[in-house]
Amino acid sequence: MSIDELTWLQEWYVAQCDGDWEHECGVEIGTLDNPGWHIEVDIVRTGLEGASFAPAKVERTATNWFSCEVADGKFKASCGPRNLGEVIAVLRNWAGERR
């Protein structure tokens, strides 16, 4: 049975928590004023650190878009107001390739 993107992100976060990582790293999700979402996920000291990631950018409409990159030890994404699950799926797929 497949789990949804938010549940996957929660489980990924819990798997990183080792008594140290969560004190310095984490996941931040916020809103943009255009409107939309922004997410930053620390990947330092995880299985994703050092893995190559090809930036992704999709522009369908003014409210249906996303942009993802890895920079400064973080997975960073911005997206339209209904695309948060889609950018979490990008992270999930990338993490799945690292197994």
Image (cartoon, rainbow, N blue to C red):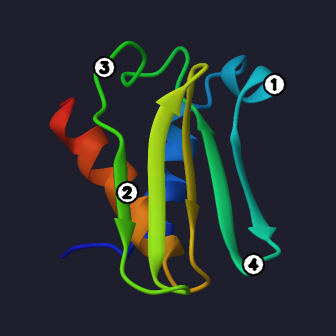
Q: Nearer the viewer, mark 1 or mark 4?
A: 4
User: Is residue 14 left or right of 64 when viewed as pictured?
Assistant: right
- Name the residue: 49% across, 56% down: 9
Residue corresponding to mark 3: 51
Residue corresponding to mark 4: 34
Mark 2 is surrounded, within 10 Å at the Cα level, by few (under 14), some (14 to 19) or many (20 or more) other residues, namely some
Task: Give the number of marks.
Answer: 4
Q: What distance separates the C-alpha of mark 1 from that of mark 2?
A: 31 Å
Q: Nearer the viewer, residue 76 or 9?
A: 76
Q: Nearer the viewer, mark 3 or mark 2?
A: 2
- Name the residue: 47% across, 31% down: 70
Q: Nearer the viewer, mark 1 or mark 2?
A: 2
Q: What distance separates the C-alpha of mark 3 from that of mark 1?
A: 23 Å
Q: What distance separates the C-alpha of mark 3 from that of mark 2?
A: 19 Å
Mark 1 is surrounded, within 10 Å at the Cα level, by few (under 14), some (14 to 19) or many (20 or more) other residues, namely few
**29 relative to 97, above or below:** below
Residue corresponding to mark 2: 57
Mark 3 is surrounded, within 10 Å at the Cα level, by few (under 14), some (14 to 19) or many (20 or more) other residues, namely few
Q: Going from the N terminus, do you reach mark 2 or mark 4 first?
A: 4
User: Is residue 37 left or right of 77 when viewed as pictured?
Assistant: right
Which circle marks residue 70 in the picture? none
